[in-house]
Structure formats: structure tokens, C-alpha cells
Amino acid sequence: MRFVILLLALLFALAPVYWMLTISFKTEGEQFASPPPWFVFTPTLEHYYDAFVTRSFGQYLLTSAIVAVTSTALALIIGTLAAYALARFELPLKLNRRLSLWILSTRMFPAIVTAVPLFLMMRDVQLLNTRAALIIVYTAFNLPFVVWMMRGFFADLPRDLEEAALVDGDSRLGALVRVVLPLVAPGLAATAVFCLIVSWNEFLFALVLTQTDAAMTLPVGIAGRVTQYEIKWGVMSAAASVAIVPILVFALALQKYLVRGLSMGAVKG
Amino acid sequence: MPRSRRFFNAQNKRELLLPALFLAPALAVLLALSIYPLIYSVTISLQQETAAGISWTLGNFTRLFSDGFFWTAMGHTFVYAVVALTCEFLLGLGLALLLNNQIRGRGFFRASLLVPMMLPTVVVGVVWRLMLNPNFGAVNGTLKQFGIDTESLTWTASPKLAMLSVIAVDVWQWTPFVFLVLLAGLQAIPQEPYEAALIDGSSRWQTFWHVTLPLLKPSILIVLLLRTMDLLRVFDQIFILTEGGPGFATETISLYIYRAAFRFFDFGYAAAMSFVLLALTNVISATYIRLLQGRNA
């Protein structure tokens, strides 16, 4: 009985996604067939060709990738430095705790609250419809998460190793790069994957800040097709299916690091 | 410890330099892109363009009270949040209780159930546009095979069913998240209280009510907090599924703010409304956090 309920939950979670995948491989005739063909149909790649070669989805894909990778790298560099300072130095005025909480609180604003002024600010500095605008905004958006995560990882690390490096005459930055970072690498990787997923999936800021083919991300490109009158369902499904691929890869990568992180803990304990 | 103090204490000015340098880029980015936008927003919400130029006014805020659309959108947001939260919580808790026992292939189940919440919300919108399409969607297609008349079931295009449809999609995407957090919470509960309950001869229901639920309360509050925050600001899926329609049937507060700003270019009014949303989410999250701390104290 319990197994049946679980199977139903599984079916419910996965069938809709599977349905979209089949639409992306069906000819238009079979897309509209009744009853709907779930399993037996003649697969075609025409919608993928149409989306990524004939139309501009290849370009949106590239923009999404560039924006996600660049903003993640920037957030990691800036955030890790801040996290290290918050985890390791005893600052006056209870600043460690106060700054950490303040940084986390900036992540709590509903996106639409900052989207309106950010649109106007980007318009003022003429960065609308550029990848740079998205990179800047996503860096700021991911930063609190990076600081919060990495602060935890640094705090878990014993200080002895860094102190040994410092006694040996290494500089602070040298100790951080050569001794501390390798030890928190799994945590850093998990944080990076999380930032990549968030940037890749993000919609509202991208919608507000980019409206041209040259600058829009994959989600905005897909949304633009959905809300038109005559919808090319195959093209849309093909683009959406491709948008899922990196997420699945990221999720697998994260799983590996989670396992590694756990086993590291097990070895230590 | 004395050595730690030597290396990591930053009480005097010279020793403050290094942590300050490490912190400066992050603080600069957040000041420029989180705090400055808020100040900018306050400014434009207090301004109105008149024939004589820009004047300072509370007009954008007083206008909120007489704007029926704003209150309707607030009502929609409230209904959306309450119904979706209730369904997600009950389903997520049920699944977590089921999966907490030993079951073959649990890892596989767990990984598969997480797929919906990992997807980009835009893709979720596309998936359900396809599923719920009245002409060729899998939902109506399947119902038809069971002999159900689907003539009036136009889902997202129907004024009556549109809200139900967007809520169902949210439940589909986010129940797995509730499930994941509650399952982790359940697994962190030690065995002893259950053994004690068994010795006392408590029924399964009593055990659940007096042992499981109180011990799970922190996880429950955290997951409710996170979901409530997300539900109150919902935008992406509804934008893709209905764009707030048909008519105004699924217009939530975030969509209404978006429309005011980017369709009518009424940025001042959009900013004023966004502060109401911000205040609302702050009050609710503060309440949850107080409940959480009250328990731990």
C-alpha cells in the first residue's frame, strides 16, 4: 500500500516533465493527437533545429551560460573573502554577528521590490539590455548566500593549520589560498553549484533588465514565446528541455560533493 | 587560545585593516545593489510628476487605499499563499512520514521527487501550459479517456479554474521541498522518546501528536517561513501560465506591481506598493522567527 502511494507520487512528480519532453520530439500532427500518445510516436529533431539554429535560442543559451558562470565566480570570490573575515577575525562592536545578520537580511527582500529601482538605475547608467547588468545583479543576489554558507564552513575548520602556516611566515592571503581553501573545497563547490542553479533559473530580473535578442537569457526567451498569440509548442518545449539539462548535471555534481562532504566528516569524527 | 587571539583579534586600528579589506568588496556590492535601490525606491515613491515639475507627496501611498485592483491583488495573494501552503504542508508531511520508514529504493524515490523544485520556474510554466492545454493537454486527454466531459475544463483560461490551476502547479513544484526539510527533521529525532511512548502504551496517534510533532516543530516552522516568503512574492509561474488573467483572476501583488511599473511606467506607485509587500513579508517572517526562538528559549 505504502509502495503504491509512493509510486503515485513519483508518477505525479515526473509525468508532466516527461510529457514536455515528448512534445519536443513529436511532429506537430502528433502533438495535437487525441488520445495523447504518451509512448508511441515518431521522434523528430525538427523543433530543436528550429529553436537553436533557425531562431535565436542558441544565443539565449550562450547568454544564460555566460551570465551564470561569471556572476557565480564573482560572488564566490567576493563572498569568500568576506566570509573568511567574519569567521576568523574578532571584530569590535559585535560586528561579526551584526554584519552577518545584515548581509543575510538583504537576501530576504521580495525580488519585485528591488527590480523596480534596479531597472531605473540600470537605465540611468545605460546598462539596460546588456549581459553586464545581469552579471552585476546576480552577483549581488548570490553574495549573501555565499557569505552565509562559507562562513559556516570556515567556522567548522580548526585554526591550528592556518596558525602553523602563519607562524611559518606565510601571509594571511597566502594561508587562506594555500591552506584554508583546499580544505573547504567541497563546501565551495556545493555553494558554487547552488549559485549556478539560482542564476540559471532566475526570471524576474532578467525579464525586467533584458528585452533584446542579444542580451536576453533562456528563461526570458522561452517566456517571450509562451505569451505570444500563436505558440510554437514544439520550439518552446525543445528550448525548455534544453534549459533543464544543466540543472540535472548540477544536481548530480552537488550530490557527489554532498557525499564527499559527508564522508569527510565521517573520517574526521 | 592565546595564539588565536594574537592572530585573529582585531581590536586596534592596524589589525582592523586586513578584515576591513576582505569585507569591503562585499559590503560595497550590497550597499550599491541592495540598500541603494531601497533608498532610490523610497525617493520615487514619494515623488509625483506634475506640470510644475517633480513634487514631494504622499500621493502614491494614499492612492493605495482607494485602488480596488490593489486590494483585489492582495486578496489573490493571500488566497494563493494560504491554500498552497496548507496543501504543500499536509502533502509534504504525509510523504515525509511515509518515507521515514525503511523502504526499498528510498534514495531513488527521494531523488526523483526533488526534480520539480529544481526546475526553472519558467520551465514549470511551460510544462503545465502543455499539460493543461484544453485542446491537446495530457490532463484533459487523460480525463477524456476515462469518459469525463472536458468541454468546460479550460483550466488556466477559465475565470473559475485559473486560480485553482496556478495553485495546483505551485503545490506540484514545492511539495517536494517541504517533504525534504521535514524528512531531514524526522531523521534527526532520536529513538528514546519513541521507546518511552511504546512503554507507556501510547497509541500511534498519541505518539505522533505528543512526540513527533513537538520534536518536529522547529523544522515545521522553518519550512513554513521559507514557503510563506516565497508564496507572498510569487511571480514567475503565474506570469507564464496566465499573466494574471483571465481578466484579473490570478493577478497577485508582484504581478500587479510589475504591471504598474513596466506596462504603465508608473514607477512611483509601483515602488509604494512594493513597500507594502516588503512590510507584510517582514511582519510575517518576524512572527515566525519569534515563534522559533520562543520554543528554543
Image (cartoon, helix red, strand yellow):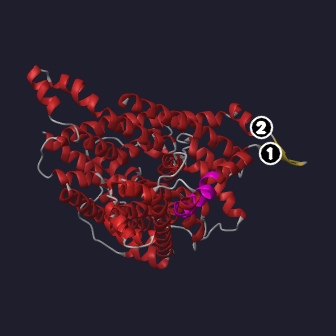
| Viewer-proximal residue among B195 and A8 | B195
The reply to whether the magenta stretch includes residue B20 is: yes
Q: Residue at x 32, y 61 (%)?
A: A160
Image height of B3 relative to B268, above or below: below
Q: Which amino acid type corresponds to the residue marked 2 in the rendered image?
A: Gly
Where disc 1 sits, the SS reads strand
- Residue A116 left/right relative to A77: right
User: In the rendering, at what x and y percent does residue B291 appear?
Assistant: 42, 29
Badge 2: how crowded within 10 Å, few (<14), some, or many (20+)?
Answer: some
Q: Which residues are magenta?
A: B17-35
Where is residue A190, by image quadrant?
A: bottom left
| Callouts 2 and 1 close, C-beta under 8 Å | yes
Residue B152 showing in the rendered view: no
The reply to whether the magenta stretch includes residue B195 is: no
Q: Main secondary structure of the magenta part?
A: helix
| Disc number for residue B59 | 2
Q: Which amino acid type corresponds to the residue marked 1 in the rendered image?
A: Gln
Badge 1: how crowded within 10 Å, few (<14), some, or many (20+)?
Answer: some
Return the chain for callout 1: B
Where is residue A23, by image quadrant?
A: bottom left
- Residue B229 left/right relative to B270: left
Where disc 2 sits, the SS reads helix
Of the numbered discs 2 and 1, the one sitting upstream in the chain is 1
Q: Residue at x 39, y 68 (%)?
A: A166
| Viewer-proximal residue among B14 and A179 | B14
Image height of A100 relative to A245, above or below: above
Residue, disc 1:
B48
